[in-house]
Structures are given as C-alpha cells and as structure tokens.
Image (tube, grey):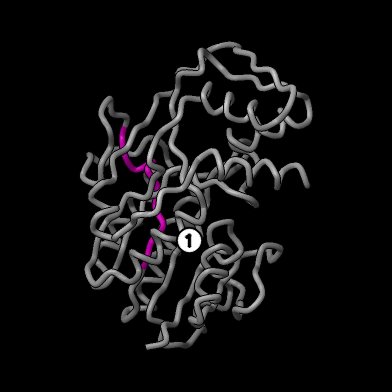
Amino acid sequence: MNKQNLIIGANSFLGACLCKRLYASGERVTGVFHKNKDNLVEGPEYYPIEELEGLEGDYTHVFIISAYVPEKGDYSIEERLQKVNVELVSDILKKFTQAKVIHCSTVSVYGVSPDAITESSSIAPINPYGQSKSDAEDLVALHPNHAIVRFSSIYGPHMRTHTFLPQIIIRALEKGRIVVFGDGSRSQNYIAVEEAVDYLIKAANSEQNGVYLAVGQNSYANKDVAGMIADLIPNVTIAFEGSDPSPSFFYNNAWTRSVLGIDEVYSFQEELKKVIGWLEKK
C-alpha cells in the first residue's frame, strides 16, 4: 500500500527532514505549515494551517510535529502553549480518526532524576512547555492508533540557532572563544535530526501503539562538548565563568531501540562537523 502522510509542522527543522525522507522513499507527502515557508523541501504538496480543517484525504499517517517552544522575551506564553500544543492536537485527533497519529513530544515531560530516565520514568514536567506536551500526550493516548515519541535536543544543519550547541559553535567561529558556565560538568543529551527521523518512521510503521524515548546514545558534559568543538575549529580557547545550577540528564532507551528495531548509531562528533560546516557557510 502506498502510504499517505500528513506532516503538520512541515516547515520546522524536523518536519522538513521528515518530508524529504518520506518523499524520497516514494510515499505521498502532504505538509501543513504555519507562517513561514522558507524551509519547505521540493516535492510534497503544502497547505497553510488555516486550511487544515478543509483537508480531505485518506491519510495513513498523521505526524504532529508543530509545537510552540517558548523563547526569551515571548509574551502570552501560557495561552500560546495551550492553543498550539494542546488545542491544535485535540483538533487533529478529532479530524483524523482513522489515521495513525504520531505525536512528537519531549523529554521535558519527565522530572529531574539522579538515575537514567527510561520510557517508564515518572511524569513530572520541568516547565510549562513540558506540561503542555504532557497534556497533549494524554489526548493522543486515547486515539485508537497512535505513537508518542519523546525527543531530547534535536540537532543538525538548519536547526534553531538560539540553543546551547549552535551558540557555542557560533562564538567559536566568530570570536575564537567558548564560554562554559560553571565547571562544565552539566550533562545534556542530543539526538541527530536524521536519527530523530528514523524513530518517527519506525514508530509510524509499528503495528502497536506505544510511547517511545528518542535520545542519543550518550549524554555529554558541556565541557566535553566544548572540547570537541575546539578540536574541530582551529585556535579556539575555552573559558569557564559563573555557575550553572541546571541539572544533568541521562537516559536509557534500550526498550525503545529494541521494540522499534533501531540499530544505527550516529556519531556525535561526525554530526557536529555537519553543524559546524553549515554555520560556517552562514
């Protein structure tokens, strides 16, 4: 059967990569975008979010990638989180009752833990964004055919540049200096965008419903990430300043990898090279 995919959030970093992969594989792809169209890949047909209600089609898979992630200086955050991350999801579930719905969620639904977080770890959202995604998960779990995929920080060329990873690369390229807060021991987890797409496609094709954890194989201390970048960019120095009270996060997604048959391991260093090369061109 030729699968028909609807990707809501097609202009996003992850959405564009998913569109490209599915279209290249010969599947039908329809994308829905919000305001911007600058990241849309050639091939699929696209519609603005305002036309979502009028879309007709026997979609086999509906991917909900669209989400509002608050940034510094944003206003009406609670209202926007509710509208985009919860109410839009509810509307999609009501409209596409026969499709398998694949919902992109976040590891922010989990609480802080001294142990490695797994798929079954307690839900205790660490911020309003995480709470909105947890609320959406509750809705998706009621859909008869669904997959919930919780991602750590997704990185790769064309990612948003305001987060830790691209910011320290930009500073290394422009100033020849990386500043790490505290002693640099805080550890974070990153998943390459192409690996994230692997998880989405595997989850979509699974015959069972499930909640999956999509994370990189390892978490990395900020000082180690800075060191890797300094090794890849000549004449870069690393400085430590201030403090960093934020917690570290570690994960174990062995169950997800086993159930979905995820066996390819992406090299963090090799994927970093791609991000650096992209930012150099910018």
x, y percentage for residue 229?
62, 30
**Relative horizontal placement of residue 230, taking residue 9 as reference (left or right):** right
Which quadrant of the structure image shows residue 86? bottom left
The stretch in magenta equals 102-111
**Relative horizontal placement of residue 97, taking residue 10 as reference (left or right):** left
Nearer to us in this view, 164 or 8? 164
Is 110 included in the stretch rendered in magenta? yes
Q: Amino acid at mark 1?
A: Ile
Q: Secondary structure at mark 1?
A: loop
**Relative horizontal placement of residue 171, taking residue 114 as reference (left or right):** right
Is 253 included in the stretch rendered in magenta? no
Residue depicted at x 56% and y 74%:
31
Which residue is the site of mark 1?
Answer: 65
Query: From what the image shows, is residue 86 above or below residue 184?
Result: below
Residue depicted at x 71% and y 63%:
38
- Would you call the spot at circle 1 few (<14 residues within 10 Å), some (14-19), or many (20 or more)? many
x, y percentage for residue 39?
67, 62
